[in-house]
Amino acid sequence: MKEGIHPKLNEITITCACGHATPTLSTSEKNYSIEICSNCHPFFSGKQKLIDTAGRVERFQKKYAQFNKKKTKH
């Protein structure tokens, strides 16, 4: 490798909102905070959290119930 052309790598820590911290190398000098990581994401963890705040599903079903009914021929 040529000398002096590569950026300097720094050891930083990426911290998730769940508390999981991952040490890594980066050209940046600051630590990062993220909202979701592979430790807490449902796809990777297998734990599905289904949160229905303020009855959004029920409001959607009520709003579009008229389109769900089948039309009958006479």
Image (cartoon, grey):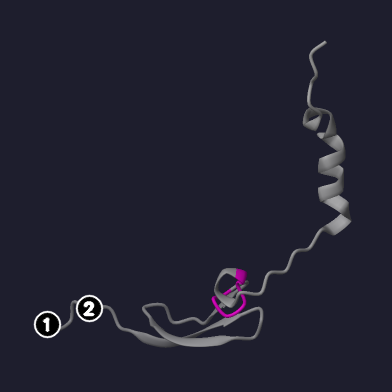
Secondary element at image label 2: loop
Horizontal and vertical percent position of residue 15: 57, 82
Q: Nearer the viewer, residue 59 or 36?
A: 59
Q: Residue at x 72, y 69 (%)?
A: 49
Give the prevailing secondary structure in the magenta stretch.
loop
User: Is residue 51 in the magenta section?
Assistant: no
Horizontal and vertical percent position of residue 47: 66, 74
Q: Residues within 10 Å of mark 2 (few under 14, many from 20)?
A: few
The residues colored magenta run: 37-42
Q: Which residue is mark 1?
A: 1
Among the 4 quarters of the image, the one containing residue 7: bottom left
Horizontal and vertical percent position of residue 74: 83, 10
Q: Nearer the viewer, residue 64 or 74?
A: 74
Secondary element at image label 1: loop
Instruction: Answer whether labels 2 and 1 touch (C-beta < 8 Å).
Output: yes
Query: Among all residues in the image, which is located at the extreme top?
Result: 74
Q: Nearer the viewer, residue 16 or 8?
A: 16
Left or right of 12, for residue 40: right
Figure check: 18 above or below 57? below
Q: As shown in the figure, which amino acid type bears the numbered disc 1?
A: Met
Query: For the N terminus, which image quadrant?
Result: bottom left
Q: Residue at x 78, y 32 (%)?
A: 68
Q: Which mark is residue 58?
A: none
Among the 4 quarters of the image, the one containing residue 38: bottom right
Q: As shown in the figure, which amino acid type bears the numbered disc 2?
A: His
